[in-house]
């Protein structure tokens, strides 16, 4: 099983995207991104939105 938060942290680091910038792209508060960064799992639609914003395919994101 993947750890969503760890994948998100790695993806942000790889793409050099701050939590504030990602929040703007997704139309959410920066605090929501902080919450996601510490979650083990998330809804599929959230994962897809995050992947699109970070320009990752879902399977690539899950293998980070």
Image (tube, rainbow, N blue to C red):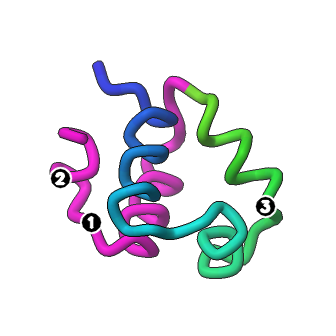
Tell me where residue 55 sits by quadrant. Answer: bottom left
Considering the numbered disc 3 on the image, is that residue within a helix, a strand or a loop?
Answer: helix
Find numbered disc 2 in the image and state the secondary structure of the residue it sits on: helix
Vertical placement of 5 versus 21: above or below?
above
In the rendered structure, find residue 56 and report the number of the disc placed on it.
1
Q: Which residue does the image show at 27% across and 50% down from the upper left?
A: 61
What residue is disc 2 on? 60
* Magenta-colored stretch includes residue 8: no
Residue 48 pos. (x, y %) = 40, 60
Disc 2 + disc 3, Cβ < 8 Å: no
x and y percentages locating residue 41 in the rendered image = 50, 29
Q: Are marks 1 and 2 in contact (CB under 8 Å)?
A: yes
Across and down, in percent, residue 50 comes to: 47, 62
Q: Separation of disc 2 and disc 3 at Cα?
A: 24 Å
The Cα atoms of the two marked residues, 1 and 2, are separated by 6 Å
Q: Based on the picture, tell me whether residue 41 belongs to the magenta stretch.
A: yes
The residue under label 3 is: 30
């Amino acid at each position: 099983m993947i750890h969503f938060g760890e994948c998100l942290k790695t993806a942000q680091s790889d793409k050099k995207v701050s939590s504030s910038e990602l929040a703007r792209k997704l139309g959410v508060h920066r605090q929501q991104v902080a919450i996601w960064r510490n979650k083990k799992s998330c809804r599929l639609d959230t994962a897809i939105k995050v992947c699109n914003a970070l320009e990752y395919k879902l399977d690539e994101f899950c293998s980070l």
